[in-house]
Image (spheres, rainbow, N blue to C red):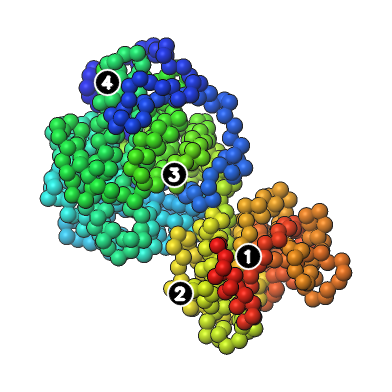
Amino acid sequence: MSWVQLPLSAPLNSTTKSDDCTLKAHRSWDKALLSPPDGQTMWTEEHRDWTKVKYDSLEDGTAFPKQFMWGVATASHQIEGGNTNNWSAFEPRSKSKQLSGEACDHWNRRTEDIGLITDLGVSHYRFSIEWSRIVPQEGEWNEQAAQWYSDLVDELLANGIQPMATLHHFTQPIWWEEKGGFEREENLHHWIDFSKRMFALLSDRVRWWCTINEPAVFTTMGYVLGEFPPGVRSFKRAKAVAMNMMRAHATCYQTLKGMENGGLCEIGLVKNINLFDPYRRWNPLHWLQARVLDGMFNRCWINGVRTGRFKPPSALRAKRVPGLKNSSDFIGVNYYTHLLATPFMPTKVEIDPLIRPWEQRTDFRYPMYAEGLRRAFEMVKGLGLPIIVTENGVADDDDDMRPEHIRRHLQITAEAIADGLDVRGFYHWSLMDNFEWAEGYDQRFGLYHVDFETKQRTLKESGATYASIVKSHRTPQVVIMAGGLGTRLGEVTERIPKSLVEVNGKPILSHILDWAQRQGCLNALVLTGHLGEQFDEFTHPGMVVNFHQEPTPLGTGGALWNARSLLEDRFILLWGDDLHPIDYHSLLKTHEKAGAPLTMTATTKHEQMNLKHAEGRLEAYNKTTQTSDLNGYESGTSVVEKSVVLEHGKEGVWSWEETVYPALSGKAAVHLDQTAFWDMGTPERLALLETFLKESTL
Ligand code: BGC
């Protein structure tokens, strides 16, 4: 975020001694006497001793729910390069005077950058759509530019990443800026039209939509502090802009919800929550200042969405905004810091803001204050909406703060979830170093370092930290074998591939994916063969499902080898005609503990046996002859390291189990689990599965 200080008073010398006589570090939830403007919760400023905090649950993958959305975020103008918009026009007059120019050259390096996202192991990516590229002149529509975003979405999905699109992230076309932009209500329909067309193009694939990014920052920075375009300092104009941004958001939300796919998509406003705390807690003037700023920057916007009546900062009365009430399916929270308020706050970013003595300054000069993220959640809780952290990160040139910054903010988020707050996801700002608006390239927020000369991207230590926390929590990709002929099922599989045969009202594949999704899996690869074209229309809401068809029957091993470029480093292997509702988490734990290349699930409750195991390892696999030393039956779900496919794979037709299992005897791990598996190999077993699904509470 760009930190905001309103020009209410003269600059304060940054060397002023902080007074913490009433505020102790390491004290939890320091209760203050004054309640905040919404009168609901006490105004508190928690500080904790982070040296005592243990991050075990972040590391062992137990801090977050299985379906948590793990993401990274960017914005078009900050990374794409080559944009012509209100910002590129303003840059020569900006504080840093730096030009965005080629930025990260993301426009030409899309595939490489998707690789960076994939390498982090995250499941979600937030980007913004550059309106000025798509509508460079009034009345024009640049099909190619629109297609670029459509291709981006396809590529993300093909890599198992769910896109989240933002329709306005600080930038707009020059022709629209010249008409007065958000200052004039009659201009709004242009942006609504653009939003409608992009929604029509992408909403069959993009489920998550943000209308406007940080309207309070846009208004304050552009029209009060003059640090963003158009570089104005006028409360009067700011008032009009604020009002019209809320009108635009409300109309956009209502319009998109009414369109095809509107009901299936989640559309929300993104609000930056900048906390304001009284610098000296005994001084009523400091309280007053903090309260005024909090009201102007945070509460009036949140209350607007809650009540449908909006009172822009500095306006005297609230006005009803049509469609504003409940105009969000989720609330996006961008959180960066708190600011300490006094009646004498600096109006220039060059002057360091006040911080508590134990706090650490970020490169942006405001402090790292992770405890405030919880307060931001509490502030939006009254909306009764799912909360998504749409941005959180830190400017930290040498990356020595960022790993800890990530851990602290994730710890706070995990605690909030454990306390019952509905926080669904976390998008780190930002994927890579980029053009930081008025600060130019001087503030680096990325998980990847970008050399702006060569455009080379390099993973930072913090990137590895985030990736490892994500990895410990995410359920790997499921790979489903759905290419078999299903001859034992008789006539039906001559017309329909086995996995699409309906059981209890929907294809078996949907039941399998339902289970995988409940286990936190958001990404499936289905290997098809026989009648593979019939999967073309298949989707599973909330999951990325990719299909890969073998050209001719290759057997189970051949099918995996054929799809090797689409396999994640670790995946869960399932059969497309087999429902095996086991707990993936404990299976993955066994796998992790054993450090095995492959972990298979076995049951002892089966009339036949096909494997011998001892002390958690596979000793022998024998599918054909029943010998008395066999003591388990392989029950379907296994965890596989991709390296196994690469090592044992070959071209042509071959069987996975008959090749790999014998080769891994002594090495593969066995996870004992007595959960029944339900296959539909024969008409009789299909009938049993039908009964099971009818009666079960799965
Ligand atoms: C904005 C980003 C910006 C980030 C860091 C947020 O306010 O949405 O565009 O880069 O803060 O300052």
Q: Residues within 10 Å of mark 3 (few under 14, many from 20)?
A: many
Ligand 1 lies under 8 Å from the Cβ of mark 3:
no
The residue type indicated by label 2 comes to Asp
Q: Quadrant of the N terminus?
A: top left
Q: Residue furthest bottom?
A: 491
Tell which circle, 2 or 3, labels the residue nearer the N-terminal end: 3
Tell which circle, 3 or 1, labels the residue nearer the N-terminal end: 3
Name the residue beneath numbered marker 2.
Answer: 536
Name the residue beneath numbered marker 4.
Answer: 288
> Which numbered dot is residue 423?
3
The residue type indicated by label 1 comes to His
Tell which circle, 4 or 1, labels the residue nearer the N-terminal end: 4
Q: Residue at x 25, y 47 (%)?
A: 325
Name the residue beneath numbered marker 1.
Answer: 580
The residue type indicated by label 3 comes to Val
Tell which circle, 2 or 1, labels the residue nearer the N-terminal end: 2
The residue type indicated by label 4 comes to Leu
* Residue 356, quarter of the rendered image: top left
Q: Residue 150 location in percent, x, y?
A: 36, 62
